[in-house]
Image: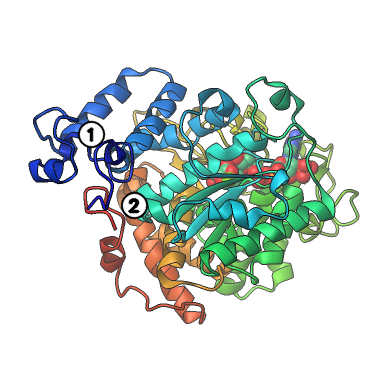
Amino acid sequence: MAGKKVGYDVLRDPTLNKGVSFSEDERKELKLVGLLPPRTQTLEQQVERQLTLLRRLNSPLDKFVFLQALLARTQRVFFKLMIENIVEVMPVVYTPTVGEACQNWGHILQFPRGLYISYKQKGSILEVLENWPTDDVRVIVVTDGERILGLGDLGCWGMGIPVGKLLLYNGCGGVYPEHTLPVQLDLGCDTKSIRADPLYFGLDMDRVRGAEYDAFIEEFVRAVQKRFGTACLIQFEDFAQANAARLLHKYQMDCCCFNDDIQGTAGVALSGVFGALRLPGVEKDLSKHTLLFYGAGSAGIGIADLIVDDLMEAFGMSREEAKRKCWFLDSKGLIYEGRASLTPEKLKYAHPNPPQIESKDLLSAVKALRPSILIGVSTIPNSFTTEVIQTMCEISERPVIMALSNPTSKAECTAEACYRVSNGKAIFASGSPFDPVTMPDGSVRVPAQANNAYIFPGVGNAIALCGAKHVTNQMFLESAKTLAELITDEDMAVECVCPSLSRVQECSAHISYRVCKMAEKQGLATRPIPKSVEEVQALFYNPAGSQK
Ligand SMILES: NC(=O)C1=CN([C@@H]2O[C@H](COP(=O)(O)OP(=O)(O)OC[C@H]3O[C@@H](n4cnc5c(N)ncnc54)[C@H](OP(=O)(O)O)[C@@H]3O)[C@@H](O)[C@H]2O)C=CC1
Ligand SMILES: CC(=O)C(=O)O
Ligand SMILES: [Mg+2]
């Protein structure tokens, strides 16, 4: 029901606007007679109309702009279209197109969405949050724009990422749109070309760093708690390495928050590894594998930390023993004990007695360390060269190769290259979508999209449902196990180590249920938890249903 709004105030409110689907009675009651064409049409017909228009567009960026405009007009049609066409729509509203959208944010923005909180508002962040029109915000995705996908510092043009992530919360994770809030913090931008763009609308200043940065984040966190309550989940997204883990450690047990690049990515990557272990020819025992990470930032260290947690839990290994299974390369080469330029996060994986290594490059490291699992989180496109893939195949019968960097232009290798060079021996997953590949023998490989989009909507939904006080690493381990259990024999038949993307909503519901149970087990749930996956699903946002 539309409340007190009538006429164009209804049609111009995307949360109320049903367009031509308003019934005769609603049209009379809401003073819409004459403002709409005479015949009432179904939501399905509206979706069909918009889908046809969408498919007429050729460029992914034009599709992105079209869908954002649709969302700004009518939430119901947008989300129904998105949910029913998730495999087609996700690459538009999310990676890879969201990367291009962020790079062009000042050129494509047409409708306000979310909150921009700039350094000018230091000391009055709460007042900015008060401007948000609804009180019952349960999930915030916040970025400071410094590490947008693998595209670097895009300043306040990073807003596309919180917007995109929250659309997945709504469309894949069942969280009601009115309970979500995208936030862009503008603390400056160090990419001069972005600031020089005449249409850049962020602050024209170098990034704030050090104590002033920390004080701003602290003010933001406390203002969120005051405005929306301590149960409001804060998802930190696309913060640079220097801040991501630091902020997570500071706030993880202090408020209700998590870092998606560290923890969500870990959940999906570990699930992909579990999936790979099920394939023929792969050593089933994870403790017998050696993992090499190309990139030692938020994603890489996060994945390793969760693998270590699993090795300790599943095999009774000591933390030190488990950590030694994971080796890292960063931009300066192999990480080992005593090397220069080691952050506290990298120090955890700086092992003593590294093997003799010819040079600092990846191929030399692969030859020396002989990994069976190679994980790319480096932002360096095509760094998994033919030689690297061939060497992985010489080391193991079925190497696992994950090119997780986003967007597609930053992937360490393409699916096609990985399957072709390895002659189909390699098991591949990527962060951004790649098309299925037909092998010379006619068999088909479907590359898994190992993207945290499989994890965060379900985790966030669970936190909002059960009112968890904190988000724990065990919840992400549980998410990884849950997701892996949802990989079907059909997925395995095409060597896809994630459940089909078309089932992402179902995956989120299962994850949500299991995370709720974990929250209860850990004594962190403050509300009764759903009793089944079906109960979680019944609580999902349904664009065709009535507004909450
Ligand atoms: N699939 C998914 O779900 C996810 C994918 N990602 C993607 O992973 C990538 C990395 O993200 P994140 O870890 O957060 O980023 P960070 O900036 O935290 O880390 C990037 C890492 O890559 C290293 N690196 C840069 N250049 C090289 C090089 N030439 N050789 C070796 N290592 C190099 C950096 O080295 P140094 O430390 O020396 O600077 C750093 O360790 C991004 O593209 C991101 O989009 C991230 C999260 C989720
Ligand atoms: C997927 C994601 O979170 C990233 O690439 O940063
Ligand atoms: Mg991210």
Q: Position of residue 465 (x, y in %)?
A: 40, 68
Q: Amino acid at mark 2?
A: Gln
- Residue linked to disc 2: 505
**140 sits left or right of 21 in the view:** right
Question: Residue 343 or 208: which is nearer the viewer?
Answer: 208
Question: Residue 121 or 518: which is nearer the viewer?
Answer: 121
Q: Quadrant of residue 548?
A: bottom left
**Badge 1 element:** helix
**284 sits left or right of 329 in the view:** left
- Residue linked to disc 1: 47
**10 sits left or right of 261 in the view:** left
Q: How is the image coloured?
A: rainbow
Question: Residue 199 or 536: which is nearer the viewer?
Answer: 199
Q: Amino acid at mark 1?
A: Val
Can the viewer see residue 197 in this picture?
yes
Q: Quadrant of residue 303?
A: bottom right
Dividing the image into four quarters, tell me where ligand 3 lies.
top right
At x 71%, y 60%, the residue is 218
Q: Position of residue 514 (x, y in %)?
A: 41, 69
CB under 8 Å between discs 2 and 1: no
Q: Position of residue 124 (x, y in %)?
A: 68, 54
At x 79%, y 44%, the residue is 208
